[in-house]
Image (spheres, rainbow, N blue to C red):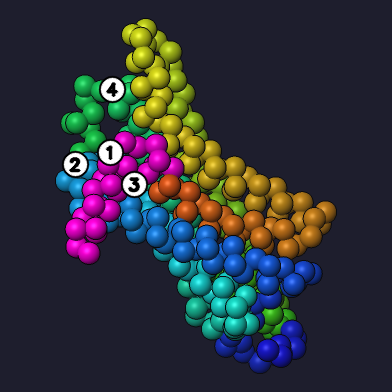
Amino acid sequence: MTLPSNHSTSPVSEFFLICFPNFQSWQHWLSLPFSLLFLLAMLANATLLITIYLEASLHQPLYHLLSLLSLLDIVLCLTVIPKVLAIFWFDFRSISFPACFLQMYIMNSFLAMESCTFMIMAYDRYVAICKPLQYSSIITDQFVARAAIFVVARNDLLTMPIPILSSRLRYCAGHIIKNCICTNVSVSKLSCDDTTLNQHYQFVIGWTLLGSDLILIVLSYFFILKTVLRIKAEGAMAKALGTCGSHFILILFFTTVLLVLLITNLASKRIPPDIPILLNILHHLITPALNPIVYGVRTKEIKQGIQNLLRRLKEIK
């Protein structure tokens, strides 16, 4: 596809995405593993959702929260990866003006929703270990419903201004985005307006939402560890830590990837711009694939539910 000039004074109706501007040959090598990871993420999350829906024993608050996490992963993955694969496989680089900012909105809001869901799951584990006798009265279906409303409302309202501010800018400096996806930073670089408010708002909101969630997660695990260290019954400590294992692994991976992305963006002058782009795409692929697999492998009830699901499918055949 022949790309238009990157300098224009006419109103922008669409953008063109240039994946890996310095190493465009990468996309041919990455297209197959990205496609396989995408299929794995979709299949794993769909299997987990169906299993939780069909298994009555999994109709519990913790698994409802896990279902919410899977739904968020599916939406994030579907928002980013099909477009990336369309560029890799078919060279479909154009994206309409509304679609670009819709993608930006979903990426910002759903990433914050995922962080918030991890925080609520950490609170669930805190109550389960530190206040086991009160667990059934605190963590109820009503609690999960309110938590889901809070997750959506908080992150929807606070991240909505990011794409709105970006969409109101004048894009007279061109419409070629040096990225595979419509990130706020990549898109706003094309504006000839002052983007200070836009950039500062995303920075403050990002650190406020993700930072506050991380602080609450750390506090939850601090009190969990403190309680576990007091347990003297044989095997009780291992059992208590085992209930937090899957959640802790996923949080550790989630926060590590975000920190690596942050560091690479801050050090953008010292590393090729293609590296943060690659890491951003991998974050939208590996995290959705990893979440259901870790819980499926480490959680006995989910493993049993998946086995029951496979047995039902065999009976249908």
Question: In terms of secondary structure, where does tag 2 sit?
Answer: helix
Name the residue carrying label 3. 66
Mark nearer the viewer, 2 or 3: 2
Camera-nearest residue between 203 and 243: 243
Mark 2 to mark 1: distance in Å? 8 Å
- Is residue 252 inside the magenta stretch? no
Q: Residue at x 28, y 38 (%)?
A: 301
The dot on residue 301 is 1
Task: Give the SS element for disc 1.
Answer: helix
Disc 2 crowd rating (10 Å Cα; few below 14, some 14-19, many 20+) is few
**In this picture, is 9 found above or below 189?**
below
Magenta stretch, residue numbers: 294-317
Q: Is residue 30 above or below residue 307?
A: below
Residue 160, horizontal then vertical, whole percent: 46, 64
Closest to the observer: 73 or 33? 33
Position in image of residue 10 (x %, y %): 66, 92
Query: Label 2: which residue?
Result: 57
Q: Nearer the viewer, residue 55 or 196?
A: 55
Residue type beneath disc 3: Leu
Front tag of 1 and 3: 1
Q: Are marks 3 and 4 in contact (CB under 8 Å)?
A: no
Give the Cα distance between marks 2 and 4.
22 Å
Labels 2 and 4: the sequence-earlier one: 2
**Residue tagged by mark 4?**
131
* Closer to us: 190 or 169: 190
The residue depicted at 54 percent of the width and 83 percent of the height is 96
